[in-house]
Image (cartoon, rainbow, N blue to C red):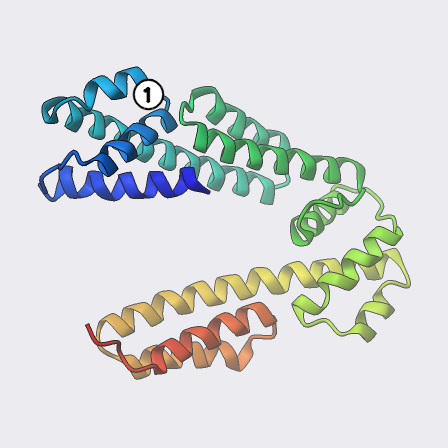
């Protein structure tokens, strides 16, 4: 996406100029970048062109662009994290409101678009939670979580063809065998149990991996590369979820690779 690339480039430029005190050279390329990104953060083309006539006015423009990117990015991250937390609690209405509140104040079109995507996803997950029906365009595991939350609220689980297909897709990702899946799908109670198993395995795998990553990074930075390797070996000794096994193996390969020459 060109807009996201422009924002990354102008952010790097702003850091060099505003934080590292590098000189701002108003070349044609730099003028074009600042002019484009000014409009991308809701500063008019006319205001941008006037500011770019001289360095004394171009630098405040760059500072304003930098601030809007920083503020927009921070707001989006905070709102997304809060919406995720509310979703995990089963409060989809509050999660939607968080994103609506963000859209009420955000001026940068790029961040508005990202917020609208998140709001649309949460709204559709709320429909899954309310109706128990699978949505064909949503990721599998968030739908499993919504269905599991629905069951916890006392709603009956309907073993539809869509749900069977969803569980057949997701079970292998949590190292649940085809035999186990087929047996579980003989009854709603079995389907509920396998849903909980899939979600639990991913939750435990994520927590385990993140804890090990933190310890691995600390040990590596302290010069204890062997200790850092052991963190990933410990993960691989117990992990069954293929995704997190692959991630641990990738980290281990990185630690085993010789350092690149500068």
For label 1, the crowd category at 10 Å Cα-Cα, with few meaning under 14, some 14 to 19 and many 20 or more, is some
Badge 1 element = loop
- Residue 53 lies, with reference to residue 231, above or below; the image says above
Can residue 91 be seen by looking at this rendering?
no
Which residue is at a point 77% across and 56% down the rendered structure image?
166
Can residue 175 be seen by looking at this rendering?
yes
Which residue is at a point 56% across and 75% down the rendered structure image?
239
Residue 123 falls in which quadrant of the image?
A: top right
Q: Can you identify the residue that label 1 sits on?
A: 43
Residue 232 falls in which quadrant of the image?
A: bottom left
Q: Nearer the viewer, residue 58 or 206?
A: 58
- Residue 156 lies, with reference to residue 183, above or below; the image says above
Which residue is at a point 86% across and 70% down the rendered structure image?
183
Relative placement, left or right, of 119 versus 10 is right
Task: Give coordinates of residue 78: x percent, y percent.
Answer: 42, 37
Task: Give coordinates of residue 61: x percent, y percent.
Answer: 21, 25
Q: How many marks?
A: 1
- Residue 171 lies, with reference to residue 117, above or below; the image says below
Task: Give coordinates of residue 105: x percent, y percent.
Answer: 43, 21
Relative placement, left or right, of 136 versus 64 is right
């Amino acid at each position: 996406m060109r807009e996201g690339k422009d924002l990354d480039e102008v952010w790097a430029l702003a850091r060099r100029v505003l934080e590292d005190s590098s000189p701002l050279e108003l070349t044609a390329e730099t003028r074009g970048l600042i002019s484009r990104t000014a409009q991308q953060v809701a500063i008019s083309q006319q205001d941008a062109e006037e500011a770019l006539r001289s360095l004394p006015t171009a630098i405040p423009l760059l500072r304003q662009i930098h601030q809007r990117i920083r503020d927009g990015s921070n707001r989006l991250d905070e709102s997304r994290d809060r919406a995720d937390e509310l979703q995990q609690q089963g409060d989809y209405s509050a999660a939607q409101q968080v994103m609506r509140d963000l859209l009420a104040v955000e001026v940068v079109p790029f961040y508005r678009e990202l917020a609208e995507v998140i709001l649309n996803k949460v709204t559709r997950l709320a429909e899954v939670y309310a109706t128990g029906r699978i949505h064909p365009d949503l990721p599998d595991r968030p739908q499993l979580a919504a269905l599991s939350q629905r069951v916890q609220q006392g709603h009956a689980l309907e073993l539809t063809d869509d749900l069977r297909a969803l569980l057949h897709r997701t079970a292998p990702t949590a190292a649940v065998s085809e035999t186990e899946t087929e047996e579980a799908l003989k009854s709603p109670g079995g389907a509920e149990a396998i849903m909980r198993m899939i979600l639990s395995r991913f939750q435990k795998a994520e927590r385990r991996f993140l804890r090990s990553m933190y310890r691995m990074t600390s040990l590596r930075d302290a010069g204890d590369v062997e200790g850092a390797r052991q963190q990933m070996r410990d993960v691989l000794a117990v992990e069954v979820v293929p995704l997190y096994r692959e991630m641990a193996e990738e980290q281990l390969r990185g630690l085993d690779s010789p350092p690149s020459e500068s």
